[in-house]
Every structure is written in C-alpha cells, then in structure tokens.
Image: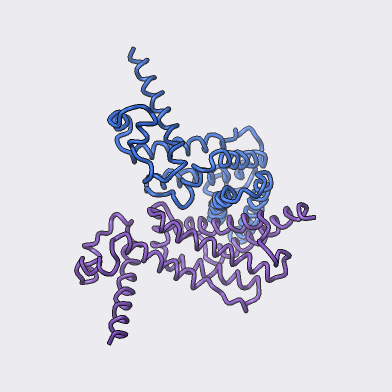
Chain colours: A purple, B blue
Amino acid sequence: MAVRTRLSVEARREQLIALGEELFAARPFDEVSIDEIAARAKISNGLLYHYFGSKRDFYVEVVRAAVQGLRAVTAIPDSVPEPERSVRSLDAYLAYVEAHAPGYLQLMGSGGGADPEVAGIVDALREEFAARILEGLRRTGLEWAAGDAPPLLRGAVRGWVGMVEHASLDWVAHRDVPRAALAELLQAVLVSTVQAALTADAPARD
Amino acid sequence: MAVRTRLSVEARREQLIALGEELFAARPFDEVSIDEIAARAKISNGLLYHYFGSKRDFYVEVVRAAVQGLRAVTAIPDSVPEPERSVRSLDAYLAYVEAHAPGYLQLMGSGGGADPEVAGIVDALREEFAARILEGLRRTGLEWAAGDAPPLLRGAVRGWVGMVEHASLDWVAHRDVPRAALAELLQAVLVSTVQAALTADAPARD
C-alpha cells in the first residue's frame, strides 16, 4: 500500500511537470499563474503547493526535468568511437532543440535565466557537455590523460558549447537552415577549435 | 541657469550609474538595496527614486551604460581594413571583460539575465556584434552585398559571438590563459567558421 501511494505521487508529479513544460514553454514564468496550472491539472492550488512548495519551486523542477531530458538524449555510449560519438551527440542536441523550440527559446533566450538556481542548472549542463567533449578527446589518445585538459583547450571547448547554444537560438528563431547543415558546420568548427587550441598550447608545454 | 541645472542632473545621474556599476558588479541585483545605494551616494532614498523611478529601473540604466561602454570600445572605425578591424574589436572586447570581470560575470554569468529588459539589451549587443562581422565580411567583397547574409553564415557568426561570450566567462572564472592566446584562438575559429559556412552555403547557391 505504501509503495502504491508513492508511485501515485510520483506519477502525479510527472504529470504536473509535463504540464509545466508545456505552459512555461509557451510563456515566460511571470505570465503563468498558479491558478492556471492548477486549473489545467484539475487540482486545487493547495495540492499544487503541497507537491512543489511554490510556483518558483515548481518552475525549477520543470527546468530540471527539461535539462535532464537534454542531458539524456545527448549522452552517447562510450562504446561509440570518436568522432562519431560527438557527431551523434550534437545531432541529438539539435533534434531536441527542434522538437522543443518554444521551451528552448524561453529557457535559453531573452526570457530565460530569471532565477539563479535555474541559471545554475543550465550552467551545469554546459559544463557537462564540455567535460564530455574533453573526455572524448582524452580517449582518442591526447596527452593530458593524467590530469586536467590544457586551459586554452578547456576554454575553447567551453566556448564552443556556447556557440552551439547561440547558433541554436538563431536557428530556431529563423528556421531557414536545415538541421544537418547546421550540425555539419558546428562539428567542423569543433574540429578546428580543438586543433587551434592544441596547436597554441603545444609550444608552452615543450 | 536652466542649462546649469540640467548638467548637474546629468552629472549626478552619471555618478549614480558609476556607483551602480560598482555595486551590481560585486553582488547580484537582489542583494543590493536601495538603502545601500543611497547611503553610498550620500543622498536620500527619495532622491534616488526621483532620478530612476525604482531599483529595477536604476539597474536597467546601469546595465545599459555598461553595455554601451562595451559597444563603444569594440567599435573599430570602418577605415581599418579587415581582418585587422575584427582582430582589434575582439581584443578590445577581451580587454573590457578583463577590466570589468566581476560585472561581466554578474551580467553574463549565472547571476545575470534576471530581467527580460536586461536580457534584451544584452541580446541587442550580440546581434550588433554579429552584424558588424557580417558587414566587415561584406566589405571584403563577399557576394551578398545587395541583401542579407546567407542563413548558415548568419547563424554561424551569431554562434561565434556566443562562443566569445562563453569562452570569456570561462576565462575570467579561471584566469589561467593569457588574453593574447585566447584572442588568437577565437580569431582563428572565426576565420574557420566563416570558411566552413561559406563552403557549405556555396553549392545551394549555384
């Protein structure tokens, strides 16, 4: 009985978070009211507060779920060799952006970042993307296996993650470039970014 | 007399905005109080409200002034030939970031973007950076002189502007890369980004 109740609570939370993704994708945080969320979910405001504490807490959970979705689809198994792994990860990222364009624009674009905790969740994802790329490079035999990546390479890869994000925002705002063309361009830029960073780093490590 | 009074108001506003840049660079918006601003400026809270309406309006003016400063230092005259013009602009950007690191982190990093109007001001600057680069390319004789840049090139350049921003955030957070090395890397990535975008666009326009 206890298990069954807990599952039901989990299911209800998931249902509410899915509804939140829909509502917060369509409009900014300030324009979505607790009344509307509760009415759409056919529950009382009180029950919504019971599950999530506050509208802000609810929003943070919605963002966390969306970011977790993006993290999951872009996590390509280590068994896939580079560069195919990073190509597939980038393509999954852009596919997710395309499928969730309004929510992506709200979260990453001008309307987003209205909350330091939300900004921190998004930042952690960016850092994870950069770490995955560096890990992929490390496994191809680059030499910093024992420690951190060279600083310039770390910054360059972190910058490239920002490029993907901003190019994605431009892409979903204009919708005039095929996804494959954007993916190919960004992948080519990643390759040349890494090459440029390693070339520049090399003399300092001689 | 009227002129003198107006100048005095302008000078007072400028003084308050400079103080705001200092305070909002050190801590997030929510942690800076009107009381503190007024006390530091040695004026009454009422006079501060008289000048700026609200703490939020004051903050927006502070951001506007900071963004205007960044816009101004990166505006290299058209008379400077490419690629020197874009090299100098990028170097001026990074020099500004270095000189205003705490404020840059607050505005562009996790703590920033707490306000749609602020986000819009920052976005407009990004678009202007991208437009300047495209204009520089156009003047070097690229073929879209009569109209808009090809979509992939536009998106790629806008993405690169995001890369500069994110690499800058990583840079000021870690401070372990010389500015010249970062500038050189980012400039090399811009060149290869433009080349990749033009190569990919070319077949479609045959």
Q: Is residue A68 above or below residue A9?
A: above
Closer to the camera, A71 or B196? A71
**Left or right: A170, with A145 as reference point:** left
- Viewer-proximal residue, B193 or A162? A162
Q: Position of residue A1 (x, y in %)?
A: 27, 87
Which image quarter: residue A91? bottom right
> Residue sitting at 44 percent across and 44 percent down?
B27
Q: Quadrant of residue A195?
A: bottom right
User: Where residue B75 sits in the image (x, y, percent)?
Assistant: 56, 36
Left/right of residue A64 with respect to residue B171 in the rendered view: left
Taking the spot 36% from the left edge, 31% from the top edge, the residue there is: B39
Q: Residue B206, relative to residue B132: is it above or below?
A: below
Relative horizontal placement of residue B34, taking residue A128 as reference (left or right): left
In the rendered image, residue B151, in percent from the top left (x then y), is placed at 53, 55
For residue B16, above or below residue B205: above
Instruction: Indicate whether A14 appears above or below B114.
Output: below
